[in-house]
Image (spheres, rainbow, N blue to C red):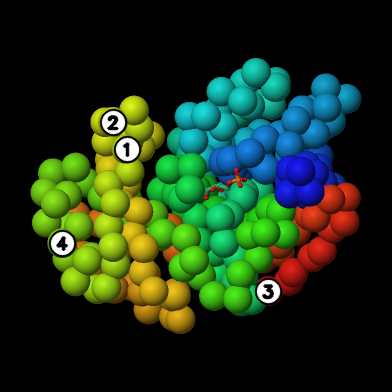
Amino acid sequence: TANDRGKKAAGENAVNYIEDGMTLGLGSGSTVYWALKKLSEQVKQGLNVKGIPSSKRTESWAKNLGIPLTTFHEIQELDLAIDGADEIDANLHLLKGGGGSLVREKIVNTASKRVIIIADQSKRVAQLGNRPLPVEVLPFGWEVTAKRISHLGAHITLRDKENQPFISDNGNYILDCQFPLITDPAELHNTLIQLVGVVETGLFVELADRVILGQDDELHYLEK
Ligand code: DER
């Protein structure tokens, strides 16, 4: 589809921002897959990079593609993170977590000097919140945490996988929280993050430096 072609175009274009010797934050999702595939071609031609994966799924993709990996034990600041998003608003605030990797994604992105987001055009929205907001919570007492979030006006769904609660890479649950349109992402994040039991939210505020949007083979760029 046009969106799939857009994901591929955006993913491959992001690799142009990678320079020899860089340390990378490797995001998660199907758009990032195209960036990893393109990157692996350049690694095979001698490009020298090391990446920290933001999910176990990205880690296995990178290993299969021959992209060298490292850890935060070795380096605590990355040159460039490339990641996807579920929604992108006009201020480049993001709603993320559709793939369940939001906690490690936020850790990797916030440890990077520069963050480039890649997506198909359909992720562009006027306001965040058309989709449910993923919130990672500790399993213990999640029902209480869910109630607290519902009191903020959200309809809560415990994310499941094959009729069991979905378990994140960190051993936690994810609540998909359908709010009315989110007019102030920073305020909502700051409110949610203080609730007992909340580990992290899928609101990525002031994190993206550049967004590459693909639609068919056309690319559009958004700058902060
Ligand atoms: O979970 C996330 O935030 C991912 O970046 C993801 O949802 C983006 O997904 P896609 O690239 O497969 O559309």
Give the amino acid at mark 1. Asp
Give the amino acid at mark 3. Lys
Q: Name the mark on residue 224.
A: 3
Q: Earlier in the sequence, mark 4 or mark 2?
A: 4
Q: Earlier in the sequence, mark 3 or mark 1?
A: 1
x and y percentages locating residue 85 in the rendered image: 58, 54
Relative to the observer, which residue lies in front, 102 or 48? 102
Dot 1, how many residues are within 10 Å of its Cα: few (below 14), some (14-19), or many (20+)?
few
As measured in the structure, the alpha-carbon distance from the residue carrying label 3 to the one carrying label 1 is: 35 Å
As measured in the structure, the alpha-carbon distance from the residue carrying label 4 to the one carrying label 2 is: 21 Å
Give the amino acid at mark 2. Asn
Label 4 sits on residue: 147
As measured in the structure, the alpha-carbon distance from the residue carrying label 4 to the one carrying label 3 is: 35 Å
Query: Can residue 22 be seen in the rendering of this structure?
Result: no
Helix, strand or loop at disc 2? loop
Helix, strand or loop at disc 1? strand
